Amino acid sequence: MNYQQTIEYLFAQLPMFSRLGAAAYKKDLHNTIALCEALGNPHHQFKSIHIAGTNGKGSTSHMLAAILQTAGYKTGLYTSPHLQDFRERIKVNGAMCSEEFVVRFTEQVQPLIAELQPSFFEITVAMAFSWFAEQQVDIAVIETGLGGRLDSTNIIQPELSIITNIGWDHMNLLGNTLEAIAGEKAGIIKPNTPVVIGEAGGSIANVFIQQAKQQDASLVFAQELRQIEHTSYSHRHLAVSIHHQQKSDNYLLDLNGLYQTQNLLSVLAGIDILQSKGWEIRDEQIKAALANVKPLTGLYGRWDIIHESPLVVLDVGHNEDGIQQIVRQLKHTSYEQLHIITGMVKDKDVDKVLTLLPKDAHYYFTKAQIPRALPENELLAKAITNGLSGQAYADVNTALHAALSAANEKDLVLVCGSVFVVGEVDRSAITR
């Protein structure tokens, strides 16, 4: 098989959560353990950091990877889902794994696929671990896919675990209370392994405290270590002043969303721990990396400005907490008229998300080209009952063309609601 045939084989043959939803979710680690054992347990050949959370785990993972790269460590990065190229999931020092490796690995594990019937995610986790071992990385930042306790990535023994926050998402799989969801995320806490909690309070914090006690793992809450003194948003950069141990530090982030301030606190708390364990990371390297996360790691889709006049922004926010953060960001952004292009998947709390969106925007309802996508006309009907108005479009690029045709130079065009809708945006068409 060539590369394109290999990708088509993986997409067609393996149950894929991003396309099918819960039907593709494997609720145990058996297949991942069996796959990795057959491959010589590649995850034992490199150190790792494990990241979970409802929102922010992708940005947190990329920030950490950027810092480790800048500090001179050969750094692997595993994230999901991809937006446009499958190989976005598996990177070393910001470079995607090779097409040749994807083909070679898939051919190698075809007998195991026939035997185990693994999910798409289980195969990609094993693929990532194999690439990191082959590339002899010093450390890999590993983002969970869904939950934590039963996530395929949870076979690693990391240097550090980070749980960014807890919010409403995937309740059909993780539980119908925030405490239950927290319990699933807390499953990444390992014996004698330090853990950072980004945002948690009350009964949710107690879930993490109890799990850490059971595992004899040291635990810190990032918000108790540092306090944000001031933030300013200058269109393409976020400046953050942070008070820490009788001093203030200033950071410039090339990740635009104001919600990145909370992720930054988690990252800095994690770096504190890595430094205490002997990882050589200097303050100037941290600041240089945070100002250049996008070029260092290839991250995009987080309040991602892709055009000026009109301003066009992509943001992968898609659940209740993610949309709340987008609405907060809109309040700090200047524009005349707001145009929102949105599509969602069937297994989200669509009505709840729709109630959070601003009523005065022009809406362009669409869908991603996956089976999980909520049809655009159904989304439009739900939106109308929630006081929103707009039209339906069969795909995101048709919707984007309509929005750009209607917008003037001082307007804002925002694409959000689904990772998959954002991933299908044809960026090249906007500049023409």
Image (cartoon, helix red, strand yellow):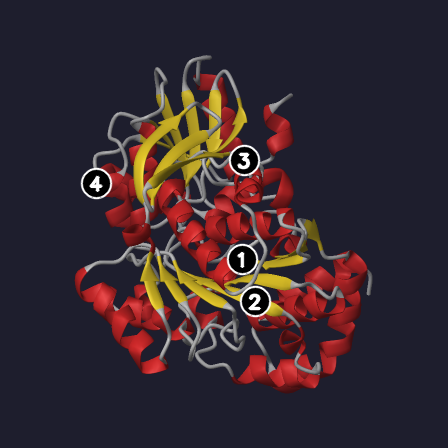
- Label 2 amino acid? Ser
Q: Is residue 365 visible?
A: no
- Label 4 amino acid? Thr
Residue carrying label 2 = 48
Q: Nearer the viewer, residue 324 or 56?
A: 56
Could you tell me residue 151's position as x and y percent? 46, 72
Residue carrying label 4 = 385
Q: Is the residue marked by circle 3 packed among few (<14), some (14-19), or many (20+) residues within 10 Å?
A: many
Q: Secondary structure at mark 4?
A: helix
> Is residue 317 shown above or below 97?
above
Q: CA distance from mark 1 to mark 4?
A: 33 Å
Could you tell me residue 160's position as x and y percent? 47, 66
Could you tell me residue 89's position as x and y percent? 61, 57
Q: CA distance from mark 4 to mark 3?
A: 43 Å
Earlier residue among tags 2 and 4: 2
**Image point 69% across, 61% down: which residue?**
8
Q: Residue furthest front?
A: 246
Q: Which mark's residue is nearer the viewer, 3 or 1?
A: 3
Lateral position of residue 43 relative to residue 23, left or right: right
